[in-house]
Image (cartoon, grey):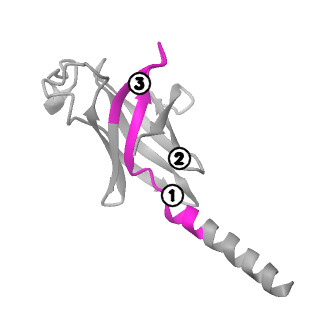
């Protein structure tokens, strides 16, 4: 009985450690349209230098892959949507390995830049992306689904 209890404890400990090891938003995420619920862009999220950033790597099936960001500000204006960095500067929140705060996110459709926070689900399959203007409660949250 003691061996079985020890084995069960070690198995639970190892699975918890494995889950913590994969607490990262890095990967490819599918965004979903708020208007019609259809898939939109594919975003590659990666951690570079301790900060999370996201780049559009594809759009909906059949979308013009040569479309440019005509409303984007600054050096992003006129750049192709595919390959455009739209999320940057997110840092891990101390004490919460699944939350990233203090970043910025660009809406290529409007050219607006918002504050951004991310929270990854415990199973790593969804990413809650919260964009806001000024104060966090003045925003909205979109759910992204892990594609890879």
In percent of the image, x 47 and y 49: which residue is there?
Answer: 100
Residue 134 lies left or right of residue 48; in this view the side is right
Residue on which the image places disc 2: 120
Residue 8 x/y as whole percent: 75, 75
The label nearer to you, 1 versus 3, is 3
| Residue 40 placement: quadrant | top left
Residue on which the image places disc 1: 23
User: Cα distance, mark 1 to mark 2?
Assistant: 8 Å
Q: From the viewer's perspective, is residue 4 above or below residue 37?
A: below
Q: From the viewer's perspective, is residue 71 above or below residue 148?
A: above
Mark 2: few/some/many CA within 10 Å (<14, 14-19, 20+): many
The disc at residue 39 is 3
Residue 57 lies left or right of residue 1; in this view the side is left
Q: From the viewer's perspective, is residue 13 above or below residue 25?
A: below
Q: From the viewer's perspective, is residue 19 above or below residue 67?
A: below
First in sequence: mark 3 or mark 2? 3
Residue 112 lies left or right of residue 138; in this view the side is left
Contact flag, marks 1 and 2 (Cβ < 8 Å): yes
Residue 135 x/y as whole percent: 51, 32
First in sequence: mark 1 or mark 2? 1
Callout 3: SS: strand
Residue at the far right in the pictured view: 1
| Foreground residue among 116 and 46 | 46
Q: Is residue 57 magenta?
A: no
Mark 1: few/some/many CA within 10 Å (<14, 14-19, 20+): some
In percent of the image, x 43 and y 37: which residue is there?
Answer: 116
Q: Magenta residues, as a range? A: 17-42
| Foreground residue among 8 and 40 | 8
How many marks do you count on the picture? 3
First in sequence: mark 1 or mark 3? 1
């Amino acid at each position: 009985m003691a061996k079985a209890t020890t084995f069960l404890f070690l198995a639970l400990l190892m699975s918890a450690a494995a889950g913590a090891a994969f607490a990262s938003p890095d990967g490819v995420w599918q965004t979903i349209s708020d208007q019609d619920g259809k898939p939109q862009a594919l975003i590659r999220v990666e951690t570079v230098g301790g900060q999370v950033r996201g780049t559009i790597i594809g759009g909906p099936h059949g979308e013009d892959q040569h479309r440019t960001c005509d409303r984007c500000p600054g050096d992003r204006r006129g750049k192709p949507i595919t390959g455009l960095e739209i999320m940057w500067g997110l840092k891990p929140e101390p004490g919460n390995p699944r939350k990233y705060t203090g970043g910025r996110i660009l809406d290529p459709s409007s050219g607006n830049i918002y504050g951004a926070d991310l929270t990854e689900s415990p199973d790593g399959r969804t990413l809650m992306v919260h964009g806001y203007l000024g104060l966090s409660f003045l925003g909205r949250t979109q759910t992204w689904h892990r594609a890879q």
